[in-house]
Amino acid sequence: MSSITNLLADLAAGKIKVVDLTQPLGPATPVIDLPPIFAPSPGLTISEISRYDDKGPAWYWNTLTLGEHTGTHFDAPVHWVTGKDLPNNTTDTLDPASFIGPACVIDVRAEVAQDPDFLLSIEGVKAWEAQHGQIPAGAWVLLFTGWASRGNDKAAFLNADAEGPHTPGFHQTTSEFLVKERDVLGVGVETIGTDAGQAGKFNPPFPNHGIMHGAGKYGLASLRNLDQLPPTGALLIAAPLKIVDGSGSPVRVLALAPA
């Protein structure tokens, strides 16, 4: 039997479960707040085209208005200035084989509960590897912070005060390590972006975006249900819409995991 046949058989037998890692997308879904000097990204607006009425008696559909990076979304390399000159860096030119990879789930819920500005260090990655094995090339590294439990409460989700948002992320050296030493496919987070909330004040600012996208890597944000995945052994699929010259898109992120 082929590996595909075995996979389908295991799915049918309930030996493999499909875990939806996607945040529901609606008008209340939180979006990033940028300083007023920058153009804002809009949330989702839904406008009805027809719903079994005189505008369309047998069909229902809507017009959607939203930013590419709304809700659970995919960041392509062209999203950041460091990746703007890379070849095949937009959502319509990326190799679709690169949307699929093993998931490495690093649980830092305890640390984040003590410090919402927690940054994952290289030492933290190596401690995880000592338990679960080295992160393989082509893996998605997912930062499990527990942030998804804040739901669609925008104030709680952004967790901002006079100093700006306070959310966890990756230390700059960790992002460099994951790119250079582990050759990951990309990183995923439960928060609204792949950099920590205070990363605009870092030097350089927003280092995870700059490092990952400059190396042709990807980002996933606003993930859910990471508690349903094992530290290793799951396969993650994150395929963005094939938007011409797109910098990213909302995405349905699915994982195949042992049941």
Image (cartoon, grey):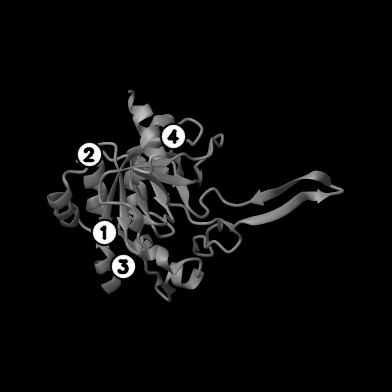
Which residue does the numbered mark 1 point to in the structure image? 107
In-image side of 11 versus 143 (left or right): right
Residue for point 40% across, 33% down = 8
- Residue indicated by mark 4: 89
Is residue 205 visible to us here? no
Q: Splitting the image into 4 quarters, where does residue 150 fall?
A: bottom left
The tag earlier along the polypeptide, 4 or 3, is 4
Residue annotated with mark 3: 117
The residue that disc 2 covers is: 136
Q: Nearer the viewer, residue 188 or 58?
A: 58
What residue sits 38% from the left and 40% below the top?
Answer: 13
Q: Mark 1 or mark 4, which is nearer to you?
A: 1
Estimate how packed mark 2 is, as few (under 14), some (14 to 19) or many (20 or more) residues with alpha carbons within 10 Å. some
The mark closer to the camera, 3 or 1, is 1
What is the spatial separation of the Cα atoms under label 2 and label 3, in whole angstroms? Answer: 27 Å
Q: CA distance from mark 4 to mark 3?
A: 30 Å
Of mark 1 and mark 4, the one earlier in the sequence is 4
Give the mark nearer the N terminus: 2 vs 4: 4
**Given the current orientation, which residue lies at the most extreme top position?**
1
* Residue 200 position within the rendered picture, expressed as x and y whole percent measured from the top left: 38, 61
Q: Give coordinates of residue 202: x percent, y percent.
A: 31, 60
Question: Which element is circle 3 on?
Answer: loop
The disc, 3 or 1, on the residue closer to the chain's N-terminal end is 1
The residues bearing labels 3 and 1 have C-alpha atoms spaced at a distance of: 15 Å
Q: Could you tell me how far apart the alpha carbons at marks 2 and 4 are, in whole angstroms? A: 23 Å
Q: Position of residue 42 (x, y in %)?
A: 59, 57
